[in-house]
């Protein structure tokens, strides 16, 4: 597979920036939900801890979103550095279909499977 064109790189950069804007907005909202208006965790309610569950759920989503933000920022750095689209595992180009679905992907599908199995 050949390298990405300047136009394709520009499109992926725009997608990544849009993702970043959405994620940072989500992070702000999740922080507010998890910590409440005063920046402290919500109290456990008399109804059996619903507030506690909601807070824990919000914190888990917050952690996931923060991880994705880091991945998006790294992808933007790869665009600037000229390595965007190349698999970090094997060096081959990541399929465009994968990059359209996961524009911050670091690995081709095969290398991603290996990484998830602890083989990379």
Image: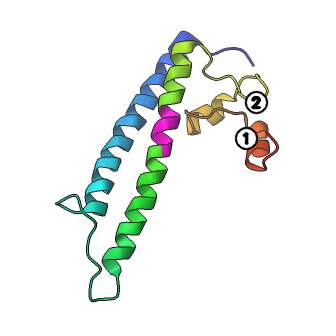
Q: In this view, does 30 lie to the left or right of 7?
A: left
Q: In this view, does 108 lie above or below 4?
A: below
In the rendered image, residue 6, in percent from the top left (x then y), is placed at 54, 10
**Which residue occupies 60% across, 21% down?**
84
User: Quarter-wise, where is residue 115 in the image?
Assistant: top right
Main SS of the magenta segment? Answer: helix
Q: In which quarter of the image is the C terminus?
A: top right
Q: In this view, does 93 lie above or below 111?
A: above
Q: Name the residue tied to disc 1.
A: 112
Q: Does the magenta stretch include residue 55?
A: no
* Residue sitting at the far bottom: 47
In the rendered image, residue 45, in percent from the top left (x then y), is placed at 27, 83
Q: Is residue 3 above or below residue 93?
A: above
Mark 2, other Cα within 10 Å: few <14 / some 14–19 / many ≥20: some
Number of marks in picture = 2
Q: Name the residue tied to disc 2.
A: 89
Model colouring: rainbow
Mark 1, other Cα within 10 Å: few <14 / some 14–19 / many ≥20: some
Question: Between disc 1 and disc 2, whose residue precedes?
Answer: 2
Label 1, label 2: how far apart the Cα atoms are:
8 Å
In the rendered image, residue 11, in percent from the top left (x then y), is placed at 48, 22
Q: Is mark 2 on a helix, strand or loop?
A: loop
| Residue range highlighted in magenta | 67-72
**Which residue occupies 47% across, 17% down?**
10
Q: Quadrant of the N terminus?
A: top right
Query: Mark 2 and mark 1 in contact (Cβ < 8 Å)?
Result: yes
Q: In this view, does 68 lie to the left or right of 86?
A: left
Q: What element carries label 1?
A: helix
């Amino acid at each position: 597979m050949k390298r990405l064109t300047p136009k394709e790189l520009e499109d992926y950069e725009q997608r990544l920036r849009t993702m970043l804007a959405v994620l940072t907005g989500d992070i702000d909202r999740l922080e507010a939900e998890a910590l409440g208006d005063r920046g402290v965790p919500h109290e456990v309610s008399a109804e059996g801890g619903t507030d506690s569950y909601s807070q824990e759920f919000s914190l888990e989503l917050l952690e996931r979103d923060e991880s994705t933000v880091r991945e998006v920022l790294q992808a933007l750095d790869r665009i600037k550095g000229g390595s965007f689209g190349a698999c970090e595992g094997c060096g081959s180009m990541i399929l465009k279909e994968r990059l359209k679905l996961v524009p911050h992907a670091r690995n081709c599908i095969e290398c991603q499977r290996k990484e998830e199995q602890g083989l990379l």
